[in-house]
Image (cartoon, rainbow, N blue to C red):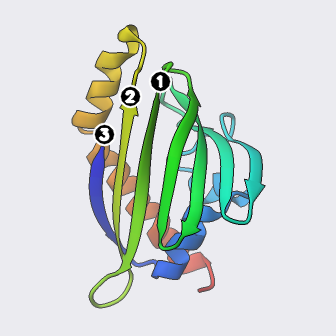
Amino acid sequence: MRFDIVTKASPEQAYQAFTDFSDRRVRIWHRTLDAKKYELRDQGDTWAVAREGSARSPFWVVVRYDLSAPPMIRWTVLESSYGGGGDGFVRIAPADGGGSRIHAEWTTANARLAQRPLLFLIHHGPLPRMVARMWTATLDQYAGNAPG
C-alpha cells in the first residue's frame, strides 16, 4: 500500500500524532484503530511495540515502530493474524503553504495462502484511498485540537 496526503497538521503535530502511544492513541486514530485490538506492549525513547488493528478488519499486527530518525517513522511487523510479516514507513515533510505532506508505504509478506487474496485486495483495491482520506481527516482534526 502506498499513498500521499496533505494535511493541515504541521510536521510537528503529524509526528506527535503518529508517535503518541499513550491511551490518547485510540482517540487520535479512532477512524482506523480499534480500541479492542490496541495494546502497547513496550516502549523506549526511540521505539515502541504495539498490537494494532482496525475495527472492520479481520487482521491485527504486532508492530515495532522505529522513531529514531524523525521525521521518518518506520515499522516492522513482528506478529500478525495473517501469519506473515511486513514493514513500512511514514515520511513527514512541510507542505507548500503550511501543513504537512505525508508519504506512507507498507507491505505484507509471507502470509498464509488462505489470507493472500484478501491482503492483495487490501493493498491494491480501494482501501489505500480510503485510508488516505481517514488519515487526512484524523490529522486535520488533530491540528485543530493539539498544540504544536
- Amino acid type for the residue under numbered disc 1: Gly
Please report contact status of discs 1 and 3: CB closer than 8 Å, yes or no: no
Of the numbered discs in the image, which one, if any, rests on residue 84? 1
The quadrant where residue 87 appears: top left
Mark 2 vs mark 1, CA separation in Å: 6 Å
Q: Name the residue carrying label 2.
A: 109
Identify the image quadrant of residue 106: top left
Q: Earlier in the sequence, mark 2 or mark 3?
A: 2
Instruction: Look at the numbered disc 3 and give the secondary structure of its residue.
Output: helix
Q: Residue 39: where, in percent of width, then height?
A: 72, 41
Q: Residue at x 49, y 30 (%)?
A: 56
In this rendering, position of residue 62 left or right of residue 127 = right
Where residue 11 sits in the image (x, y, percent)? Answer: 46, 79
Quarter of the image that includes the C terminus: bottom right
Dot 2 surroundings within 10 Å: few (below 14), some, or many (20 or more)?
some
Q: Residues within 10 Å of mark 1 (few under 14, many from 20)?
A: some
Mark before the other along the chain sequence, 1 or 3: 1
- Quick one: label 3, few (<14), some, or many (20+) residues within 10 Å? few
Q: Nearer the viewer, mark 1 or mark 3?
A: 1
Q: Nearer the viewer, residue 4 or 69?
A: 69
Q: Give above or below for 79 relative to 72.
A: above
User: Based on the displayed image, in which of its 4 quarters is residue 133 positioned?
Assistant: bottom left
Please name the amino acid that badge 2 sits on: Ala
Task: Pick the residue in front: 67 or 24.
Answer: 67
* Marks 2, 3: nearer the viewer: 2
Residue 127's disc is: 3
Q: Which residue is situated farthest in the front direction here?
A: 68
Q: Answer yes or no: do the residues labelled 2 and 1 have beta carbons within 8 Å?
A: yes
